[in-house]
């Protein structure tokens, strides 16, 4: 073999390495390109993008074509490069003092290693990295020639695909021609969170998107105001009692029940009471001005529930499987599942339900309201076991296995301790959460001296007068409640330091 022939073979091998790189780029470009992006470009008149979309419709066939091209070029590169490099390397190896009998074998081995390295870098890694970084650009560049190559070798590719598909079916898998372009809700959630971490979208936008997707899995039970916090009127109450209850709670709609809350017979609005002449309000029974209530089962998904609330009434009574009243749900309850707490002129402003507090030994500690949502607790890193509860009060009751009393403590994995501080209506009203193993840094001032506040929906109950029955269980307090707060010791209990005040917000209840 002459020097000219060897160089010619090497040049041909290098061209085939470039061809191999083209097929690799085409393969990764078609696999990584986002179909919606290609379709938008095609709709805008991009002919190359239209070719990409056509290739994606028969992706399995096109990928088989790229594999055929990669296989052919790789084999031919080896056939051409190894003997040429062996000839060119024989002289240098002899000059190094290698044994004469071993020179041919060494030249072939070294030539194979050199050819493989060049093939790997130029023919594999460079086009692969390019395609992954610029999928649409690479797909537009490669789709046309790749489509022509696959069409020329269609009979061979079809035959190979048929054999491969039969082997795949023996494994119990049905081959598909194209990748699924749709994404499951879980995949979309992961994409949104990844995009937020990468800075592609704002974190608030990602959170809203995730909550919107999560809304599909919720029912009326998940978004309702529980019956223990419902402000309601007995049928024997008067129109004046509607005004009194509105003045006390800031609400405008109330369920009307006959003898107990499980027997809801209507829904009264403030404007119905105002329509009664002032002189007649004390003797006008509320059931005479109430409207027919909208009743929905607790298992009703949020989407049809939202449609009913929009088309019929903005408030509905949620009925459990036994026919009793489980609670009430409003349009605002659903909106708050998406955007968080919605405050109006009757709500206390900027009032946290989860507050980071100073601990005497420097450990991380938070003061939480019993109605603090589990998803809010997760934001501080609390490890919460699965269970049938949705609030901090439900969590502590589930861990204790009984009605909590002040002083009860429970521990969670990860060194977390929950200490009950106040109990009201058989539920933990206030509790202290301590991370036993970590020491806190200086706390920024947010909700009070030495506190950091986390805001989320918060509930509070208090009795308010309604007339004949005297009080309505679970009515919203007309003003916020001041809860004394003191630093905690290592065990998470009150240490007796000078009290600070955290303003707990009024309840989120129906009828807004």
Image (tube, grey):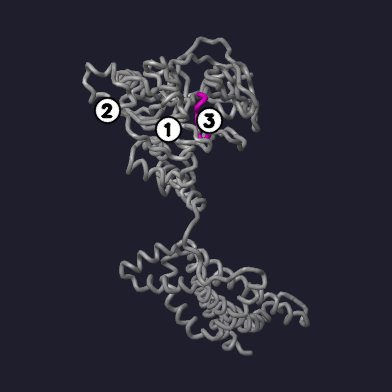
Question: Which residue is disc 2 drawn over?
Answer: 272
Comes first in the chain, label 1 or label 2:
2
Mark 1–mark 2 Cα distance, whole angstroms, equals 20 Å
Between residue 213 and residue 287, name the one nearer to us: 287
Looking at marks 2 and 3 on the same chain, the residue that comes earlier in the sequence is marked by: 2
Residue 241, image x, y percentages: 33, 19
Residue 391 tag number: 3
Q: Which residue matches tag 1?
A: 328
Point 37% across, 24% down: residue:
235
**Earlier sequence position, callout 3 versus callout 1:** 1
| Residue 512 makes an appearance in the image | no
At horizontal 31% and vertical 27% (from top left) the residue drawn is 288
User: Callout 3: few (<14), some (14-19), or many (20+) C-alpha neighbours within 10 Å?
Assistant: some
- Report whether 271 appears left or right of 420: left
Quadrant where the N terminus lies?
Answer: bottom right
Badge 2 marks a residue whose secondary structure is helix
């Amino acid at each position: 073999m002459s020097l000219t022939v060897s160089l010619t073979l090497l040049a041909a091998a290098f061209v085939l390495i470039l061809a191999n790189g083209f097929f690799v780029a085409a393969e990764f470009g078609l696999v990584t390109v986002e179909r919606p992006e290609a379709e938008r470009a095609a709709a805008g008149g991009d002919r190359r993008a239209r070719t990409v979309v056509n290739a994606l419709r028969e992706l399995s066939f096109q990928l088989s074509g790229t594999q055929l091209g990669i296989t052919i070029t790789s084999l031919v590169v080896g056939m051409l490069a190894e003997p040429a490099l062996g000839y060119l390397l024989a002289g240098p190896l002899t000059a190094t003092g290698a044994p004469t009998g071993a020179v041919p074998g060494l030249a072939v081995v070294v030539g194979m290693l050199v050819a493989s390295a060049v093939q790997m870098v130029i023919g594999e890694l460079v086009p692969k990295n390019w395609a992954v970084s610029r999928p649409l650009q690479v797909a537009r560049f490669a789709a046309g020639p790749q489509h022509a190559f696959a069409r020329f070798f269609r009979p061979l590719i079809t035959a190979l695909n048929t054999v491969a598909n039969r082997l795949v079916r023996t494994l119990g898998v049905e081959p598909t021609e194209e990748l699924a372009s749709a994404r499951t809700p879980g995949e979309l959630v992961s994409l949104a969170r990844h995009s937020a971490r990468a800075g592609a979208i704002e974190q608030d936008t990602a959170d809203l998107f995730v909550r919107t997707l999560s809304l599909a899995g919720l029912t009326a039970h998940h978004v309702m105001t529980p019956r223990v916090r419902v402000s309601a009127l007995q049928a024997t109450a008067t129109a004046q009692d509607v005004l009194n209850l509105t003045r006390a709670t800031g609400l405008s709609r109330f369920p009307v029940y006959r003898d107990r809350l499980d027997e809801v017979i209507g829904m009264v609005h403030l404007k119905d009471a105002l329509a009664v002449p002032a002189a007649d309000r004390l003797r006008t029974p509320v059931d005479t001005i109430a409207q027919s209530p909208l009743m929905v089962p607790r298992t009703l998904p949020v989407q049809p529930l939202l449609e009913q609330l929009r088309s019929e009434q903005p408030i509905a009574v949620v009925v459990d499987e036994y026919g009793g009243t489980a609670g009430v749900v409003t349009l605002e309850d659903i909106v708050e599942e998406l955007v968080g707490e919605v405050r109006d002129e009757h709500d206390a402003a900027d009032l946290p339900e989860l507050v980071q507090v100073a601990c005497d030994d420097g450990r991380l500690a938070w003061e939480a309201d019993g109605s603090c949502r589990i998803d809010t607790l997760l934001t501080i890193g609390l490890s919460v076991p699965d269970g049938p509860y949705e609030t901090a009060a439900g969590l502590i009751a589930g861990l204790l296995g009984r009605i909590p009393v002040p002083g009860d403590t429970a521990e969670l994995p990860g060194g977390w301790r929950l200490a009950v501080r106040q109990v009201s209506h058989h539920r933990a009203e206030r509790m202290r959460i301590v991370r036993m193993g970590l020491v806190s840094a200086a706390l920024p001032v947010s909700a009070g001296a030495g506190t950091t506040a986390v805001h989320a929906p918060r509930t509070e109950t208090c009795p308010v007068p309604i007339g004949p029955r005297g009080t309505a269980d679970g009515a919203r307090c007309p003003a916020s409640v001041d809860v004394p707060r003191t630093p905690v010791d290592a065990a998470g209990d009150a240490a007796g330091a000078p009290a600070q005040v955290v303003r707990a917000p009024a309840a989120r209840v129906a009828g807004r």
